Amino acid sequence: MSVGTSNPPGGRGTGRVPAPRHGDLTGLGIDPDELPDGLVVADERGLVVCFNAAAARITATAPADALGQRLEKALPLEDLEGRRWWQLTDPYGGLAIRVGQPERNLLLPGGREVLVSARYVRAEPTGPVRRVVVSLRDTEARRRTERSHAELIATVAHELRSPLTSVKGFTATLLAKWERFTDDQKRLMLETVDADADRVTRLIAELLDISRIDSGRLEVRRQPVDIGAAVGRHIQAYVAAGQPADRFLLRIEQPLPALWADPDKVDQVLSNLIENAVRHGEGTVTIDITAAASPREGEEAGTSVTVSDEGPGIPEESMNRVFTRFWRGSKRGGTGLGLYIVKGIVEAHGGTITVGRASGGGAEFRFTLPVSTPAYLA
């Protein structure tokens, strides 16, 4: 623990003053080294009396080297214009009504960025500063988020450009030269516009789903769901669209527990997994529906659905990336957002989803949902 770590007696030859024990956190039973963010505390003289493990990791400075040092020396920060931060802000001087500094990007020696916020603690509202409490956060997580958002914007722009260009081109052509085309040509153009409009609508729906998943606002409206009938409807749709009926094998193990879930979202999960098997897999697409142990603590029953094919499967090195944004199993179209959304929907139900290799060699996706029987029916 960094609080109260002793310094050389009297700090001889170092210019340090022994650091007094700072018990504000330890008195609450909290070890500063257990905090996820960096914590640096300086006393009324500007000497560091707390330098926790996270601060040591972020700054690459050992607590023993920081404790007892002046704050500006233990934590030599500069703003993005190269100005020394502590001289610029002067926490112990200036206006007596200041209470701190909002979070901002600052630079450590070597140019490493860190998020810093500070609180000035006074015994009375306009009295002298008794403590300067500094919070440090690594910027890597924020950078990953920013990169993810940039990738999402680039993907959306790319996916929107193609259908919108087609829509604009065909509608402009029809408006300018309507009389020159036959009815069959007009129908073909309008069917293309209709399909591209559907593609844009699907993309917008995916973006809304991602927004709700990332913010934890994905709503689940539970109703009784006949999972076998739902899978059957998807198979019938593929057969009606020209897929051979013998390409699909549906196996339902009875009895199944009564499943309460959001039927639209379960349908979305099934649609994505079966479409992946049809488009990217080969041979027979097998869907197994069985009773299973509930993935949620406190419930015994669950329902498991396994979708597998006989294609080449997913490379072992890609297994851990399948449910991340923008992962594509092949170059054959798609935004790479579908399986990320599938995982979000399953987890919003309290369920789990896994990927592996099927016995026939292809990909195998298995998701399990708790039955989630309402309390008044339990």
Image: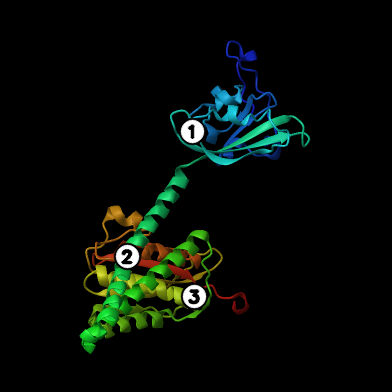
Along the polypeptide, which appears first: circle 1 or circle 3?
A: 1
Sequence-first disc among 2 and 3: 2
Q: Amino acid type of disc 3?
A: Asp
Does residue 194 lie above or below 32 as drawn?
A: below
**How many C-alpha atoms fall within 10 Å of the one at disc 3: few (<14), some, or many (≥20)?**
some
* Rendered residue at 32%/65% (across/down): 161
228 to 342, vertically: above or below: below
Give how far apart the Cα atoms at labels 2 and 1 are.
39 Å
From the viewer's side, name the closer residue of 331 and 296. 331
Q: Image quadrant for the N terminus?
A: top right
Locate residue 271, reporting x and y percent.
Answer: 36, 74
- Point 61% across, 17% down: residue: 16
Residue 263 higher or lower than 119, as above or below: below
- Label 2: few (<14), some or many (≥20) within 10 Å? few
The answer, for residue 289, to whether it is visible in the render is: yes
Residue holding disc 1: 81
Q: Nearer the viewer, residue 61 or 201?
A: 201
Please say if 295 is above or below 274: above
Image position of 276 (left or right of 214): left
Q: Amino acid at mark 2?
A: Arg
Numbered tag placed on residue 249 in the rendering: none
Instruction: Residue lying at the far bottom in this picture: please name it.
Output: 183
Horizontally, residue 70 falls left or right of residue 326, namely right
What amino acid type is highlighted by mark number 1? Glu
Where's the C terminus, which quadrant?
bottom right
Label 1 and label 3: CA atoms lie apart by 52 Å
Side of 350 relative to 238 (left or right): right
Question: Residue 161: which numbered mark, if any?
Answer: 2
- Dot 3 corresponds to which residue? 262
